[in-house]
Image (cartoon, grey):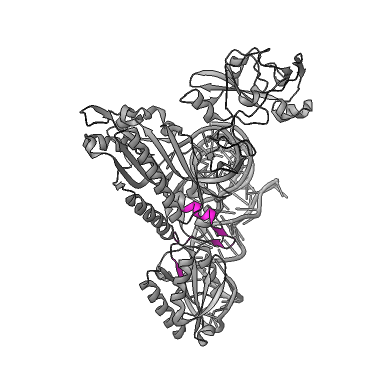
RNA sequence: CGGGAUGUAGCGCAGCUUGGUAGCGUACCUGUCUUGGGAACAGGUGGUCGCAGGUUCAAAUCCUGUCAUCCCGACCA
């Protein structure tokens, strides 16, 4: 590709809309242009990178035996009503009506459609297992889109769906995809981690997330410092590692805590550690209210609450609901005299003589004890894991890192096949629902997270596998015949070698060309100038390290190939 | 949806307090000159000041409403 005939509108300054590094650099490098909140044009340079990700994904999926198809982005409401998600999915589902007032939605995912396809054509166990996938544009009307391609509303996704005749087969399909995903992220040249995850609204029985590790990630990954356990913060199990103190139970007493609502305020006011306070959160689990108690220095985990109750929705209660449940105002809730059941986290169950809200305005109670002052309906794990907590597998210590979720695999079971009446006949002629799995990769998010993980103050440092061009040929004086002739020759050879060169044939000064090449992150640069040419040499520079070497003209293409191989 | 902020040229910003000819940098066009790290000089193109009302002789500026965008939170395969 010749730079002068391509379209790379680089920016000198960062548009005010960008905050995170991948967003800033994608805008500056001329890869994307915003059209509306969370909706982007993919400019030519950005599109090349996206296609690279797609190619890797496609190759690995095909190798794993999956078959590509393409489903529509607009889907009829009936299918969603069949699965029950038309009501369940919420506002994230963009609902639209056609000219006949028929209901449709813009697909945020395709479980319903693929289930419809498979039930129409596959009716025998002899045709199973099968794994179908597509790479396609999705739309999710996110509450708050942000960070450019990282959390867009419209984005590109690879979604695959497996259909098996039994549970054992479904597990094999799942494991097959797990391995394929590892190969995909390795082939992209990214540092990643596979973690246990919550199944969320897609539903199903178990799930793993693939996280690209980056400091700017939105997700927290808990992993063990001594074994291979790692999990999403939502999922990471907190073990009951506490022993209850044998201290004598003291009589409880009410104390005034004016203006002290939060644990921190109460702890400061009463001059006691946060860990000796137990906070009582009122949550609405589907239609009923319950109290959840966690230690003052812990965070309640809504996903765990939701799973414990097998609930559809879990939300923090409104001030009115809190008053209804406790008889007191928000900020001073406690378990004593509560009108709804109270559940305790393991850590609270081990506490004695602790401080809780008194369900009275600006009052807390000291030396409260369960068993004496109130009873737990049950005790379980309801909190977020913290660094330093005991590993649930080996007893080592948890550490916390940040990551970006780029892939998610689920074993769905019969959730959709049963709801949508998608069955096959087994070898005994009995009707059985398909056992399904679904597997997603955020293609556009992979591109963004590659930048989060690989950049410096000058710009992007693409992993070779995702780089839009592998090498940039930079003639410094395009009007000098000798320089240009050599540049053209080198460009042609590199092109024939399949090294995807970009020839910067613009009549610009050296600084402009260098700065742009570094900004857009091309792994290797060949610089052709009069001075080095007099010695029969050109310069070869590696973007990542900044190291430059002089190489004889006739050897330079070979050297470039070597370097690219080393970088891959 | 709650809290905070911002909308003036492609991009980055000033002007608004105290109403009176729309400004700077960069980018872009023309020319001269230059060419190994975002050159210099000269001349140019480009803006219904987000939108709609209102106040006023006069509104980018004051008032009301509205829309859009971003950040924090809640939420989220």
Observer-nearest of A355 and A157: A355
Magenta residues, as a range? A447-471
Would residue A495 be seen by someone viewing this image from the given angle? yes
Q: Position of residue A222 (x, y in %)?
A: 57, 40
Q: Nearer the viewer, residue A258 or A267?
A: A267
Q: Position of residue A291 (x, y in %)?
A: 59, 20
Q: Residue at x 57, y 34 (%)?
A: A392
Is residue A138 among what the camera can see?
no
Work out whether residue A478 or residue A413 is closer to the camera in this orientation and state it: A413
Magenta region includes residue A467: yes
Which residue appears at 44% of the width and 32% of the height? A201
Q: In the picture, which quadrant includes the N terminus of chain A?
A: bottom left
Residue toward you, A313 or A272: A272
Q: Residue at x 57, y 30 (%)?
A: A301
**Residue at the far bottom in the pictured view:** A534
Viewed as shown, does residue A426 lie left or right of A438? left
Q: In the rendering, at what x and y percent does residue A517 appear?
A: 51, 67
| Residue placed furthest toward the left | A429
Please determine whether, in this image, residue A16 is positioned above or below residue A410. below
Q: Is residue A218 left or right of residue A415?
A: right
Q: Is residue A188 left or right of residue A345?
A: left
Residue A129, by quadrant, is top left
Does the stretch in magenta take in A2? no
Give the tally of numbered discs: 0
Where in the figure is residue A262, as x and y percent of width and height? 69, 28
Q: Which residue is painted at 36% across and 27% down in the image?
A: A84
Q: Is residue A26 left or right of residue A203?
A: right
């Amino acid at each position: 590709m010749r730079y002068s005939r391509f379209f790379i509108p680089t920016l000198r300054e960062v548009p005010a809309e960008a905050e995170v590094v991948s967003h800033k650099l994608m805008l500056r490098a001329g890869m994307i242009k915003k059209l509306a909140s969370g909706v982007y044009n993919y400019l030519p340079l950005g599109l090349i990178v996206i296609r690279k990700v797609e190619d890797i994904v496609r190759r690995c999926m095909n190798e794993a035996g999956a078959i590509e198809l393409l489903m529509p982005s607009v889907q009829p409401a009936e299918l969603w009503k069949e699965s029950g998600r038309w009501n369940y999915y919420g506002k994230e589902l963009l609902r639209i009506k056609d000219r006949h007032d028929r209901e449709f939605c813009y697909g945020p995912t395709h479980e319903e459609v693929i289930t419809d396809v498979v039930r129409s054509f596959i009716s025998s166990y002899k045709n199973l297992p099968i794994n179908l996938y597509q790479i396609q544009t999705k739309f999710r009307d996110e509450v708050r889109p942000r960070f450019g391609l990282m959390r867009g509303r419209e984005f590109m996704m690879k979604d695959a769906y497996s259909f098996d005749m039994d549970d054992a087969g479904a597990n094999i399909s799942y494991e097959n995809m797990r391995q394929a995903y590892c190969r995909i992220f390795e082939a992209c040249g990214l540092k990643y981690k596979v973690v246990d995850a919550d199944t969320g609204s897609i539903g199903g029985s178990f799930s793993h997330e693939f996280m690209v590790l980056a400091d700017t990630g939105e997700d927290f990954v808990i992993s063990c410092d001594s074994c291979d356990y790692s999990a999403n913060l939502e999922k990471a199990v907190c073990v009951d590692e506490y022993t209850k103190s044998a201290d004598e139970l003291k009589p409880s007493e009410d104390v005034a805590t004016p203006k002290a609502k939060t644990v921190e305020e109460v702890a400061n006011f009463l001059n006691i550690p946060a860990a000796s306070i137990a906070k009582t959160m009122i949550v609405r689990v589907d239609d009923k209210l319950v109290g959840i108690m966690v230690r003052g220095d812990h965070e309640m985990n809504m996903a765990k609450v939701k799973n414990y109750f097998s609930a559809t929705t879990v939300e923090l209660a409104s001030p009115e609901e809190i008053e209804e449940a406790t008889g007191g105002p928000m900020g001073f809730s406690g378990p004593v005299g509560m009108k709804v059941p109270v559940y305790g986290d393991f850590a609270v169950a081990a506490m004695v003589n602790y401080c809780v809200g008194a369900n009275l305005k600006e009052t807390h109670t000291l030396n409260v004890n369960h068993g004496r002052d109130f009873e737990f309906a049950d005790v379980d794990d309801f909190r977020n894991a913290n660094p330093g907590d005991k590993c649930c597998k080996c007893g080592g210590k948890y550490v916390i890192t940040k990551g970006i979720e780029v892939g998610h695999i689920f074993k769905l079971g019969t959730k959709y096949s049963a709801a949508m009446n998608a069955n096959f006949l087994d070898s005994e002629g009995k009707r059985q629902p398909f056992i399904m799995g679904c597997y997603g990769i955020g293609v556009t998010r992979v591109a963004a997270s590659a930048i989060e993980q690989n950049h410096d103050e000058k710009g992007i440092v693409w992993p070779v596998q995702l780089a839009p061009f592998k090498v940039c040929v930079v003639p410094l004086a395009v009007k000098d015949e000798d320089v240009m002739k050599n540049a053209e020759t080198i460009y042609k050879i590199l092109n024939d070698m399949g090294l995807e060169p970009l020839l910067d044939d613009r009549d610009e000064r050296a600084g402009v060309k260098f700065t742009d090449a570094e900004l857009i992150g091309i792994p290797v640069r060949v610089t052709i100038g009069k001075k080095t040419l007099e010695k029969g040499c050109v310069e070869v520079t590696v973007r990542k390290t900044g190291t430059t070497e002089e190489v004889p003209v006739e050897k330079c293409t070979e050297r470039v190939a070597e370097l690219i191989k080393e970088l891959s």
